[in-house]
C-alpha cells in the first residue's frame, strides 16, 4: 500500500477511533483532535507534492491490482481537494476549541467531525464507483448526527430535511450503480471509462448519466435540488456549518466533474447544454435567495448555492466546447482545459472563503449576541479587525480584483467567451453584481450603520477563559483571510496547478493507464474478464507505485 495516498484517509479514521476511546476525557479528545487535524494537513500537502509534477498516484487494497481490487487514485484535482480538506480540518478544529460547548463535545463532536473528514478524503481519492457510494454514506451518517447534536427544535427540522433529500440521493446513486454494473460488469472508474467508450447503446448510457447527475446534484445542491441546503445550514453551531459549506458540497461537484469527464463523455451534445442550464439557474436562484435574506448565515447559505453554479460553469463550458468542435480540435481542448482549471480554482477559493465567512458570522454572534441584521450595527467601531477580516473574505466572494474569486471568475468568463457560451457568461456577470450587493448589505447593516436601540445585550466577556475562547475563534479566521489575499496576489502558481488539473481531467487515457497498469491493454482489447485470465490473489501483480 502506498502510504502517501492512504494517509489522508487513515489519519482521520484513527483520530475518530482514538477520540471514541477517550470518550470520558474531554480535554484529551481536544488534544487528539488538534493533532489529528494537523497530521491530516501534513499528509494532504505531502500528497499534493507527490502529484505536483503531473504524476497520477495510485494504490490498491490488499495488493489486488485494478480493476480486481479496490483502487485509490490521486491526480492533481483530487490532491488539491484533499489539501483543502486538511486546511479546513485545522481551521475548524482550532475554532471549535473556542466555539463548541461542553455538552456537544461530550456527545462526540470531535470523533464525528473527523469521520466527516475521512469520508471527504475517501470520496476525493476513490477510483471505484461503489466505494464512492460507501464514502458518501459514511459522510451522510456522520454529518446527520453532527447536525442534530444539541437536540434543538430548529436543528431537528433542518436535519430531517437534510437526511431525507440525501437518502433519496443515495437511493438513486445505488440504483444507478446497479444498472451500471449490470451493463458493464465493472465498477472501477478507469475500466468503466474504457468499457463505456466502446459500448454501442448511447441512449442507455445517457440515461444512466442523468441518474448520476441527479444523485450528485442533490449532494452538490444544484438547481432545482438545492432547497435542503438553506433549510439546514443555519441550524447547527457555526463550526459545523462552516465544515459543511467548505467541504460537503465540493464532494458532490467533484463527483460530477469526475464522472462527466471520465465516464460520460460520449453524448456531449446532450449533456453539455443540460449542465449549462443547471449551472446558470443555480447561480441565479441562489443569489436571488440570498438577496431576500436578513440573517447572516441564511445569506451565506443561499450564496453557497449560487457559487456552486460557478463551479459547474467550468465543467459545462468545457463539455460545450468539446461538443461543438471538430474531432481532435486543439483550440477546443485548450478552451476546455482553461474552463476546467477555472472550476478547480473556484472549488479551492470557495472552500476557503465560504468556510471563513461562516466562521466570521459565528464570531459576530459571539461578540454581538445575534446574527440578525436588523439587530446589528456599529461593529466597525467596536471591533474594527472583525470588519477588516469580513471585508477581505466578502470582497473575494464577490470577485473584486486581485482576490481569488476575481481570478476564478476571470478564467471561467474567458473560457465561456471562447466557447461561445454568451448567455451563461452574462448570467455569471449579473450574479457577481448581486453577490456584491448581498455582501455590501451585510457590511452596511452589521458593521457600518449605527447600533439600533433594540440591539440585544451582547454576551459578557469576562476573565481570561472568555478571551482565550474568542482568540481561538479569531486565529483561524485571520489565517484563512490572509490565505485568501495571498492566493489572489500570487495567483500564477495556483493557476498552473489548476491548469494541470484541467489537463488531467481531459487525459482519460493517462488516467486509465495509471490505474490499470499492465491490464490496460487487455481492458482495451476487451479480454480482461475472460475467466481463464482472471488472476488469483497470489498471482495478482503488486503495485509498483512509490
Image: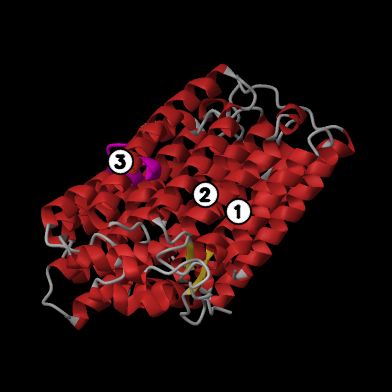
Question: Taking 403 as reference, is 213 above or below it?
Answer: above
Question: Taking 502 as reference, is 296 above or below it?
Answer: above
Q: Is residue 394 left or right of residue 463?
A: left
Kindly report the distance in space between the C-alpha atoms of the residues bearing marks 1 and 2: 7 Å
Residue 498 occupies which quadrant of the picture?
bottom left
Q: Name the residue that disc number 3 marks.
A: 175
- In what element is the residue under mark 3? helix
- Which dot, 3 or 1, sits closer to the camera? 3
**CB of mark 2 within 8 Å of CB of mark 3?**
no
Q: Name the residue that disc number 1 marks.
A: 88
Q: Earlier in the sequence, mark 1 or mark 2?
A: 1
Q: Is residue 281 left or right of residue 512?
A: left
Quadrant containing the C terminus is bottom right
Q: Is residue 450 visible to us here?
A: no
Kindly report the distance in space between the C-alpha atoms of the residues bearing marks 2 and 3: 28 Å
Q: Name the residue that disc number 2 marks.
A: 246
Q: Nearer the viewer, residue 447 or 418?
A: 418
**CB of mark 3 within 8 Å of CB of mark 1?**
no
Question: Taking 361 as reference, is 157 above or below it?
Answer: above
Mark 2, Cα crowd under 10 Å, few <14 / some 14-19 / many 20+, is many
**CB of mark 1 within 8 Å of CB of mark 2?**
yes
Amino acid at each position: 500500500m502506498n502510504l502517501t495516498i492512504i494517509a489522508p484517509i487513515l489519519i482521520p479514521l484513527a483520530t475518530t477511533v482514538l477520540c471514541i476511546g477517550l470518550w470520558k476525557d474531554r480535554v484529551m479528545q481536544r488534544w487528539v483532535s488538534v493533532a489529528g487535524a494537523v497530521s491530516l494537513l501534513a499528509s494532504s500537502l505531502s500528497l499534493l507534492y507527490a502529484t505536483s509534477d503531473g504524476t497520477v498516484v495510485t494504490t490498491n487494497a490488499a495488493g489486488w491490482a485494478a480493476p480486481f481490487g479496490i483502487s485509490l487514485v490521486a491526480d492533481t484535482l483530487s490532491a488539491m481537494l484533499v489539501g483543502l480538506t486538511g486546511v479546513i480540518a485545522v481551521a475548524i478544529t482550532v475554532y471549535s476549541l473556542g466555539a463548541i460547548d461542553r455538552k456537544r463535545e461530550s456527545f462526540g463532536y470531535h470523533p464525528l467531525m473527523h469521520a466527516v473528514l475521512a469520508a471527504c478524503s475517501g470520496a476525493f481519492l476513490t477510483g471505484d464507483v461503489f466505494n464512492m457510494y460507501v464514502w458518501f454514506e459514511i459522510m451522510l451518517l456522520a454529518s446527520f448526527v453532527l447536525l442534530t447534536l444539541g437536540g434543538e427544535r430548529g436543528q431537528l427540522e433542518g436535519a430531517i430535511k437534510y437526511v431525507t433529500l440525501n437518502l433519496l440521493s443515495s437511493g438513486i446513486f445505488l440504483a444507478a450503480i446497479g444498472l451500471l454494473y449490470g451493463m458493464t460488469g465493472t465498477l472501477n472508474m478507469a475500466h468503466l471509462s474504457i468499457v463505456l467508450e466502446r459500448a454501442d447503446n448511447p441512449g442507455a448510457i445517457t440515461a444512466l448519466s442523468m441518474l448520476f447527475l441527479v444523485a450528485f446534484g442533490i449532494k452538490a445542491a444544484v438547481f432545482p435540488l438545492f432547497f435542503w441546503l438553506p433549510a439546514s445550514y443555519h441550524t447547527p453551531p457555526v463550526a459545523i456549518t462552516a465544515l459543511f459549506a467548505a467541504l460537503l458540497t465540493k464532494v458532490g461537484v467533484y463527483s460530477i466533474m469526475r464522472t462527466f469527464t471520465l465516464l460520460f463523455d460520449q453524448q456531449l451534445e446532450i449533456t453539455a447544454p443540460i449542465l449549462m442550464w443547471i449551472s446558470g439557474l443555480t447561480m441565479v436562484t441562489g443569489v436571488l435567495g440570498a438577496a431576500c435574506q436578513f440573517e447572516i448565515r441564511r445569506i451565506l447559505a443561499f450564496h453557497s448555492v449560487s457559487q456552486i453554479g460557478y463551479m459547474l460553469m467550468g465543467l459545462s463550458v468545457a463539455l460545450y466546447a468539446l461538443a461543438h468542435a471538430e474531432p481532435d480540435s486543439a483550440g477546443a481542448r485548450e478552451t476546455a482545459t482553461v474552463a476546467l482549471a477555472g472550476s478547480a480554482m473556484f472549488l479551492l477559493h470557495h472552500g476557503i472563503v465560504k468556510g471563513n465567512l461562516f466562521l466570521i458570522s459565528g464570531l459576530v454572534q459571539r461578540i454581538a449576541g445575534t446574527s440578525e441584521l436588523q439587530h446589528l450595527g456599529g461593529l466597525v467601531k467596536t471591533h474594527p479587525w472583525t470588519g477588516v477580516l469580513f471585508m477581505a473574505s466578502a470582497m473575494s466572494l464577490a470577485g473584486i480584483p486581485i482576490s481569488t474569486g476575481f481570478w476564478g471568475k476571470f478564467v471561467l468568463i474567458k473560457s465561456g467567451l471562447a466557447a461561445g457560451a454568451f448567455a451563461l457568461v452574462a448570467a455569471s456577470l449579473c450574479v457577481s453584481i448581486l453577490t456584491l450587493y448581498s455582501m455590501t448589505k451585510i457590511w452596511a447593516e452589521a458593521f457600518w450603520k449605527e447600533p439600533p436601540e433594540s440591539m440585544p445585550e451582547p454576551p459578557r466577556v469576562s476573565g481570561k477563559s472568555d478571551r482565550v475562547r474568542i482568540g481561538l475563534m479569531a486565529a483561524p479566521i485571520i489565517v484563512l483571510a490572509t490565505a485568501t489575499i495571498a492566493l489572489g496576489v500570487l495567483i500564477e502558481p495556483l493557476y498552473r496547478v489548476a491548469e494541470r488539473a484541467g489537463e488531467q481531467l481531459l487525459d482519460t487515457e493517462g488516467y486509465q493507464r495509471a490505474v490499470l497498469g499492465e491490464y490496460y491493454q487487455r481492458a482495451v482489447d476487451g479480454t480482461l474478464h475472460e475467466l481463464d485470465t482472471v488472476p488469483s490473489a497470489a498471482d495478482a501483480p503488486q503495485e509498483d507505485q512509490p
